[in-house]
Image (tube, helix red, strand yellow):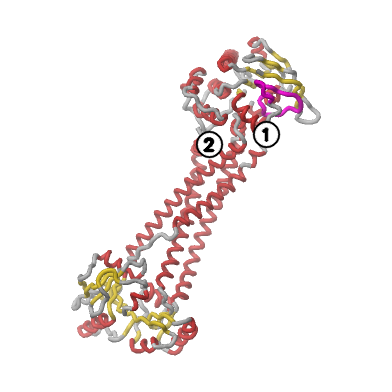
């Protein structure tokens, strides 16, 4: 026999109130953990994907769409721009590097990007197996592409026109050959297929000859230029200059993504506040439950004092009851959050071919545990007040 | 062994109890008779160390319980004193067996192998050992109260109105059980009651 066992017996002796307290605590803990983790992962993924791109220059349209399509590769591009004119922008004195990209084809849902070798450096990765593309129709594939499509060096495939998984219009005159596989980055490049710009142009030239009505692309069109500035001054002058004096659109990824994040953060904050409110109610219900236990079981607590137990044993009894309920709820909440997060991450992997990992999850769990522990201590401290005022003689006299 | 000297106690300035001196040698029994409101329960709580007297001394086995620290008094009460209440109080979420385990645990006494089973058999409670107190009959509950008062083999057993709600037959049975248990533990038995039916069962009697 010990305090924890007695507390456990006390808890299971009142199943309905215990169930309701556990349910409220579990839901709030699960929500708080889940939302915090999603928030962290989402923000981290967005910022990681910027990879130092200060500005994107593309066709006019929605700046957010331009950033999403050319930096995060999760939307359709706003259109194409002539490469010759884009190259003139790249010569600007404020620009350190300008990487052209051409988007429009895919293979089994993975986007094929026509670009330069600088695109790989920009994403801070390198070749894991094979070599970088040098000739037309050679491709280097991201690590997730290799893994998910079981593609290896020397394999060939035909690209499809369009960005959807089941695109039916394929460029079946020129197979693309895998010559390299990139190291994994847990970044967007893992799920891209890279080739040189010329390959994309040649594929489309050939198609245009056969089916000119469907494909009117200029040979030397690109989707966008990904730009890194030499210094902050470029950020001050270039975007406005391009937007006002050219037919192109300049979008700042960090600004656009921060705007997007602020927008989504409203929902995150709302859910967090709801979870905190439930947690607050759970804390109160835990206090009420413990307080009622102290009041309703006053004669039993007085009896325990006549057994020789000191007041601190009674306090421990109340605390351990709160602790058991809190710990059990915490465990359930953490399991619930982990299960839901894993399901969401798995869905994201299936849908966007992007592997997502938990970020500082154990820290979040520890932080929340300490928070819950604090709530248990506060609930106990408030509930044990009658123990200090307990008049054993009076309580027992009323019973005997 | 129990000895009280000039014990007084007051709840208010106006009313004060002055109790007669008590002197009991080892394993002696005592019946304290008195009407309601005369201070019987107060005396029991003073002897149990639940209340502190305004004046006087109480010795139990050479320990002056009126002069020791509250911590030592709690420990002393847990080990040396057993209280049997008129209406048995037990921990409602625990079974009969677990209540006896809890009694020993809170007194800081390690459970001797078979001790609980023995007392349950002696008091005819072994068939209900896994039941909770609220499922017991009045007689079973009364016997559980006795078991809780004696399981730790105290030096003194204090029984507060143990027979007042019982019929004659059960009244005699409970007194006999208390006497038997006190004898087994070599303990002093003090019964405080207004029930004159048990007067003849005791040689030592104090009327308040």
Q: Please give the chain letter of the residue carrying mark 1.
A: A
Which quadrant of the figure has residue B62? top right
Within 10 Å of the Cα at label 1, are there few (<14), some (14-19), or many (20+) other Cα atoms? some
Task: Say if B62 sits above or below A256 in the image.
Answer: above
Please give left or right for residue A280 compared with residue A49 in the image: right
Tell me residue B95's x, y (percent).
50, 29
Magenta segment, which residues? B47-64
From the viewer's perspective, is residue B191 above or below residue A79? above
Residue B129 in picture, x, y percent from top left: 48, 25
Quadrant position of residue B145 = top right
Real-space Cα separation, disc 2 to disc 1, in angstroms: 22 Å
Q: Provide the chain ID for the residue under circle 2.
A: A
Q: Secondary structure at mark 2?
A: helix
Q: Position of residue A23 (x, y in %)?
A: 48, 48
In this view, the residue farthest toward the right is B14
Query: Residue B137 placed where, x, y %?
Result: 53, 23
Quick one: label 2, few (<14), some, or many (20+) residues within 10 Å? some
- Residue A376 can be seen in this image: yes
Residue A391 bears which disc, if any?
A: 1
Q: Which residue lies under the disc numbered 2?
A: A3
């Amino acid at each position: 026999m010990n305090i924890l066992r007695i507390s456990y017996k006390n808890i299971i002796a009142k199943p309905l109130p215990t169930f309701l307290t556990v349910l409220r605590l579990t839901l709030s803990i699960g929500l708080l953990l889940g939302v915090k983790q999603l928030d962290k992962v989402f923000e981290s993924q967005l910022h990681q994907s910027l990879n130092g791109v200060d500005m994107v220059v593309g066709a006019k349209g929605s700046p957010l769409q331009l950033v999403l399509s050319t930096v995060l590769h999760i939307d359709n591009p706003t259109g194409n721009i002539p490469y010759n004119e884009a190259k003139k922008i790249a010569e600007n004195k404020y620009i350190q590097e300008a990487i052209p990209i051409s988007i429009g084809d895919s293979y089994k849902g993975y986007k094929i990007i026509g670009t330069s070798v600088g695109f790989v450096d920009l994403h801070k990765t390198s070749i894991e197996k094979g070599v970088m593309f040098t000739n037309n129709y050679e491709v280097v594939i991201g690590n997730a592409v290799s893994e998910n499509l079981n593609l290896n060096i020397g394999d060939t495939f035909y690209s499809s026109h369009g960005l959807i998984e089941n695109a039916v219009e394929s460029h079946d005159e020129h197979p693309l050959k895998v010559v390299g596989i990139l190291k994994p980055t847990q970044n967007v490049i893992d799920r891209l297929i890279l080739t040189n710009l010329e390959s994309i142009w040649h594929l489309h030239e050939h198609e245009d000859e056969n089916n000119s009505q469907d494909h009117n692309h200029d040979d030397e069109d690109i989707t966008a230029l990904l730009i890194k500035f030499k210094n902050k001054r470029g950020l001050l002058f270039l975007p406005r200059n391009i937007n006002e004096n050219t037919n192109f659109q300049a979008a700042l990824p960090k600004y656009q993504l921060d705007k997007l994040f602020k927008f989504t953060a409203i929902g995150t904050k709302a859910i967090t506040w709801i979870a905190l409110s439930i947690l607050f109610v759970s804390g109160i219900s835990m206090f009420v439950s413990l307080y009622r236990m102290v009041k309703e079981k006053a004669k039993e607590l007085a009896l325990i004092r006549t057994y020789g137990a000191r007041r601190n044993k009674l306090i421990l009894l109340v605390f351990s009851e709160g602790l058991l309920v809190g710990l059990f709820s915490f465990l359930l909440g953490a399991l619930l959050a982990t299960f839901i997060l894993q399901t969401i991450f798995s869905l994201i992997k299936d849908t966007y071919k992007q592997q997502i990992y938990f970020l500082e999850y154990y820290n979040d769990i520890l932080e929340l545990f300490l928070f819950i522990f604090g709530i248990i201590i506060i609930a106990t401290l408030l509930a044990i007040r009658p123990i200090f005022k307990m008049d054993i003689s009076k309580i027992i006299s009323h019973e005997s | 062994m129990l000895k009280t000297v000039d014990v007084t106690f007051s709840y208010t300035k106006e009313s004060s109890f002055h109790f007669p001196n008590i002197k009991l040698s080892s394993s002696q029994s005592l019946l304290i008779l008195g009407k309601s409101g005369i201070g019987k329960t107060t005396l029991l709580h003073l002897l149990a160390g639940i209340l502190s007297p305004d004046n006087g001394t109480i010795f139990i086995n050479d320990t002056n319980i009126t002069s020791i620290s509250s911590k030592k008094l709690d420990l002393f009460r847990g080990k040396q004193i057993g209280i049997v209440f008129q209406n048995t109080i037990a921990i409602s979420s625990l079974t009969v067996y677990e209540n006896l385990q809890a009694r020993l645990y809170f007194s800081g006494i390690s459970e001797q192998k078979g001790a609980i089973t023995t007392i349950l058999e002696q008091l005819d409670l072994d068939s209900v050992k896994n039941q909770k107190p609220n499922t017991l009959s009045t007689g079973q509950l009364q016997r559980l109260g006795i078991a809780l008062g004696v399981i730790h083999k105290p030096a003194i057993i204090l029984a507060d109105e143990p027979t007042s709600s019982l019929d004659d037959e059960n009244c005699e049975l409970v007194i006999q059980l208390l006497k038997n248990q006190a004898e087994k533990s070599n303990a002093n038995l003090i019964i405080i009651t207004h029930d004159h039916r048990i007067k003849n069962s005791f040689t030592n009697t104090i009327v308040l």
